[in-house]
Image (spheres, rainbow, N blue to C red):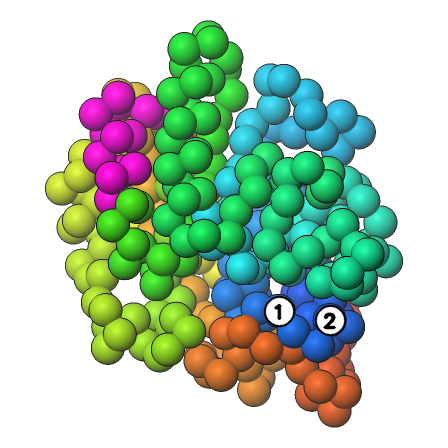
Amino acid sequence: MNDQEKKQLLVTAWKVRKGIVESTHAAKSGHPGGSLSAADVFTYLYFRELNIDPKNPKWEDRDRFVLSKGHTAPGLYAALAHRGFFPVEDLKTLRRIDSYLQGHPNMNSVPGVDMSTGSLGQGVSCAAGMALAARKKGMGCNVYTLLGDGEIEEGEVWEALMFASHYKLDNLCVIIDNNGLQIDGPIDEVMSSYPIVDKLVAFGFETVAIDGNNFDQLESAFEKFHRTEGKPFAIVMKTVKGLGVSFMENNVDWHGKGPNDSEYEIAMKELNAKLAELEAM
C-alpha cells in the first residue's frame, strides 16, 4: 500500500477505537480491551481485505468474517459502522434492551454480521464449515475468523483446526489475537496455549507471526494467505490489549467493563489527540 492508503487506514483505525470507547461508555459495560487490540485488524479486513458490499450485506459471493471471540463485538460494530453497514450514531445504543447491537454479534439483526457468536470456540468451527461449504458450492469467496488467545484454550478450537487441515481449506484464514491477557489474567498463567505458532504448524496450517498493530505486517500476512494453496492459513498477531487508551493498555481489568464518565473523558482526549496527529500527517 502507498503512504496515503496507510494513513487512511490509520485514521480509520483510531476512529474505530473511538467507537469502541463511546459504545462501551454508553452501555456502561462491554469488552473494550480486546476490541482495542484488534481494532487494526478489524480496520484492515473491512477497508482493504474483504470482498463485501455494505449496500448488499447478504451478497451471496461475499467473503465471510466470523468473530469467534464474540465478546469483542464493540470493535466489530465500530468497523461495520464506519464501513457503511449502519449509522455510526447507533454505536451508542450498544447493549440496550431495544437495540439491535447486543453484547455479542447477532447475524439476524446486525447488517454485515455473518455468524452469531459468543460461546468461545464455536465461531472458528462455524468458519471452517463455511469454508468447506463454499468449496462444495464452487464459490470463490474466502472465510476469515478472529480468535482470542484465551479462547484457544477451548478444545473445540483444535477440533476445528484439525478439520480445516484435513480438508485442506486454503480458503480459510484463522487469525489469533495474541494480546497475552484473558479475563482472569495472563494466558501463560491461567492456561498457557504457547507455543501457538508451533501448534498451528503441527496441525497443518501455513502460519505467520506478526505485529498485529502494524498495517505493513498485516498486508504482508494477508498477501501470503492469498498465495498459499493446499492448506489453511493462520496469522498469529502479537498485539497490545487496550491499545490507544493509556490506562487500559496491558491492563487485564479492562477485559470486560465500560469506562465511567471521568475515564471516558480521559480516553477520548487521548484518542482525539492521536487522531488529530494522524490527520495532520
Q: Position of residue 259 (x, y in %)?
A: 67, 82
Please say if 125 is above or below 180: above
Residue 216 versus residue 46: which sits nearer the camera? 46
Q: CA distance from mark 2 to mark 1?
A: 7 Å
Looking at the image, residue 184 lies above or below residue 193: below
23 sits left or right of 167 in the view: right
Tell me which residue sits at (29%, 45%) in the image: 156
Q: Residue at x 51, y 40 (%)?
A: 66
Please state if 27 lies on the left or on the right of 229 as rendered.
right
Pick the quarter of the image with the C terminus: bottom right
Residue position for label 1? 30
Magenta-highlighted residues: 158-172
Q: Find residue 26 and report its horizontal and vertical position in percent.
A: 77, 72
User: Where 92 falls versus 113 (above or below)?
Assistant: below
In the image, is residue 165 part of the stretch drawn in magenta? yes
Instruction: Please identify the dominant SS of the magenta region.
Output: helix
Please state which amino acid type lies under the numbered disc 1: Gly
Query: Looking at the figure, which quarter contains the N terminus?
Result: top right
Residue drawn at (56%, 38%), measured in percent from left and top?
115
Report the residue that reaches farthest toward the top.
Answer: 138
Q: Are marks 2 and 1 in contact (CB under 8 Å)?
A: yes
Q: Report the residue that reaches farthest toward the front.
A: 97
Q: Amino acid at mark 2?
A: Ala
Which residue is farthest left? 202
Where does the image place residue 14, in percent across and percent down from the top left?
Answer: 67, 64
Q: Magenta stretch: residue 79 in it?
A: no
Say what secondary structure mark 2 lies in: helix
Disc 1, SS? loop
Q: Please rate how many residues cluster around mark 2, counting C-alpha atoms within 10 Å: few if below 14, some from 14 to 19, many from 20.
A: many
- Disc ID at residue 27: 2
In the rendered structure, the answer to whether residue 266 lies left or right of residue 227 reads right
* Dot 1 alpha-carbon crowd within 10 angstroms: few under 14, some 14 to 19, many 20 or more: many
